[in-house]
Amino acid sequence: MGTITSDETSRRQFLAAAGLTATTAWLTPRALFAQSDDVLVPGALKAAATAGVTVQALRRNVSVLLGAGGNIAVLAGPDGKLLVDSEIVSSRPNVSAALASINADPVKQLINTHWHFDHTGGNEWLHEVGASIVAHENTRKHLSKDTRVEGWKHTFPAAPASALPSTIFKDEHTLHANSTTLILKHYLPAHTDSDISVHFTEADIFHSGDTFWNRNYPFIDYSTGGSIDGTIRAAEANLAKVTDKMIVIPGHGAVGGKADLILFRDVLVGIRGKVAALKKQGKSLEEIVAAKPGVGTDEEWGKSFMTPSAFLALVYQGV
Ligand SMILES: [Zn+2]
């Protein structure tokens, strides 16, 4: 199974290197913004260099790699490996070791669920070892030029040509590899404007990209087309698609299923409703954070990538 270290260890390493601790969750927005310089992306790059990557076998010939960045799905077989997402660039040694623990076959194909650095960071090295890259057209667009993400206070330089998807599509794209049909579908703007889902149809495994964070508050990238309402719309789209036996790989968090998608939708809708009502009453973001609209989930959902107040700021922005 190639287990290197636990998920929990990765998360702690991520938080430590990003300079975040559990106490960050209870800072006021003003304090949070005061310290929210360009620290998250550099911290994530540093953390991913040492974070463990865990291999979890799912069904048929599909596994998932769980590490510091976005979850990677791996489809193995005689055509070589097919990957969904490529993690943070600095996780290369640990991702390589995890892939080698599955088998010695090369990676031949890579699909990006969206353009973010923690899902496309490995594009360049995976292309160099033989993978061709498929993604939505907006993934190539954002990777092709300098792109600012205001929510992370970070500007990503244009990626080198070898890291860019060579096959792009608009709405839907079908691939065949290793006796598997993969259906790639674009979402209406949600977490970004480049989000796609990947359905391994025979195994009935669904990679949602960052339209679903399992028991974690999601980041929402308003700079490249994301919004809270788009994120909720995508959560509804995932629920319309999911079956009782479907295995769902989230962008971040543990592998889940239908009940987890329902919970995610309900939490987002609940918090959005409370924030919108308070904002309509004229409450400031600081007052809304103090009212703790996510009191039931803050402790569990706000301890990893997104603090409760950082998530509330993203919801507030969109209502
Ligand atoms: Zn993302």
Image (spheres, rainbow, N blue to C red):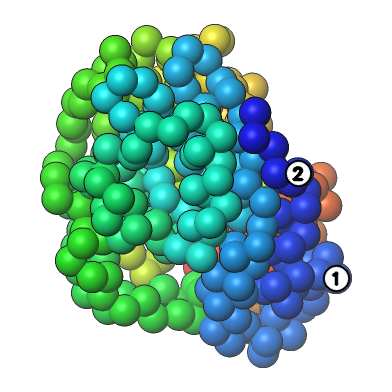
Side (left or right) of 232 relative to 194: right
Question: Nearer the N terminus, badge 2 or badge 1?
Answer: 2
- Residue toward you, 127 or 157: 127
Q: Which amino acid is tagged 2?
A: Ser
Question: Residue drawn at (65%, 28%), measured in percent from left and top?
Answer: 1
Residue 127 visible? The answer is: yes
Tag 1: amino acid: Thr
Rendering quarter of residue 226: bottom left
Measured from the top left, where is residue 76 in percent x and y?
40, 25
Looking at the image, residue 129 sits to the left or right of residue 60; the answer is left
Can residue 265 be seen in the rendering of this structure?
no
Based on the displayed image, in which of its 4 quarters is residue 134 positioned? Answer: top left
Q: Residues within 10 Å of mark 1 (few under 14, many from 20)?
A: few
In the rendered structure, find residue 23 and report the number of the disc placed on it: 1
Name the residue located 40 percent from the left edge and 27 percent from the top edge.
75
Closer to us: 35 or 96: 96
Query: Do the numbered discs 2 and 1 sit on residues whose CB atoms are within 8 Å?
Result: no
Question: Which residue is label 2 attached to?
Answer: 6
Alpha carbon separation for disc pair 2 and 1: 23 Å
Q: Is residue 71 above or below residue 237?
A: below
Q: Which mark is residue 304?
A: none
| Direction from residue 176 to residue 255 in the image, left or right | right
